[in-house]
Image (cartoon, helix red, strand yellow):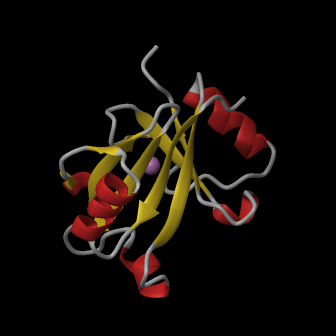
Amino acid sequence: MIGRLNHVAIAVPDLEAATATYRDTLGAKVSEQQPEPDHGVTVVFVELGNTKIELLHPLGEGSPIANFLKSNPAGGMHHVCYDVEDIIAARDKLKAEGARVLGDGEPKIGAHGNPVLFLHPKDFCGTLVELEQPEA
Ligand code: CO
């Protein structure tokens, strides 16, 4: 069901420092900071040949990554995102198998303008999983 690895998201306490680490130390191509107020994060995209890394920093009150950074003050891997061809079919199959879909279970528009869902880490090896349906 899952396709390619769309991105790995890393929550960071200092977005400038993290961007410099990826750009200067690791020699990767990085984007400008992109505020995503609907998602409570500012994102920097690191473009790799086969996937992306997303550096996430809290934006505004009640950011979904604020608590994560409290528990992981140095930052850390927050989630992995896999492509799926049909996000509704994927959700229905996962729910039928007992997996927990976060929120109200309806896809939201994610940082790339495509529908996304999040799956409970306890059902997926302790890892928060995002599913994204790329443009056809
Ligand atoms: Co993501």
- In the image, residue 110 lies at what x, y percent? 37, 42
Front one among 16 and 71: 16
The answer to whether 79 appears left or right of 38 in the picture is right
Q: Is residue 135 left or right of residue 121?
A: left
Q: Quadrant of the N terminus?
A: top right
x and y percentages locating residue 27 in the rendered image? 36, 49
- For the point 32% across and 33% down, the residue is 113
Nearest the viewer among 61 and 44 is 44
Look at the image and tell me whether residue 40 can be seen: no
Q: Position of residue 116 (x, y in %)?
A: 46, 40
Residue 41, relative to residue 8: is it above or below? below
Judge whether 95 appears above or below 50 on screen. Answer: below
For image coordinates 67% across by 55% down, the residue present is 100
Residue 77: percent from left, percent from top: 53, 64
Residue extending farthest to the right is 97
Looking at the image, can residue 126 be seen?
A: yes
Q: Name the residue at 36% across, 70% down.
A: 12
| Residue 133 in the figure: left or right of residue 101 | left
Residue depicted at x 54% and y 57%: 79
Using the rendered view, name the quadrant where residue 95 is placed: top right
Count of marks, rendered view: 0
Task: Give above or below for 97 relative to 124.
Answer: above
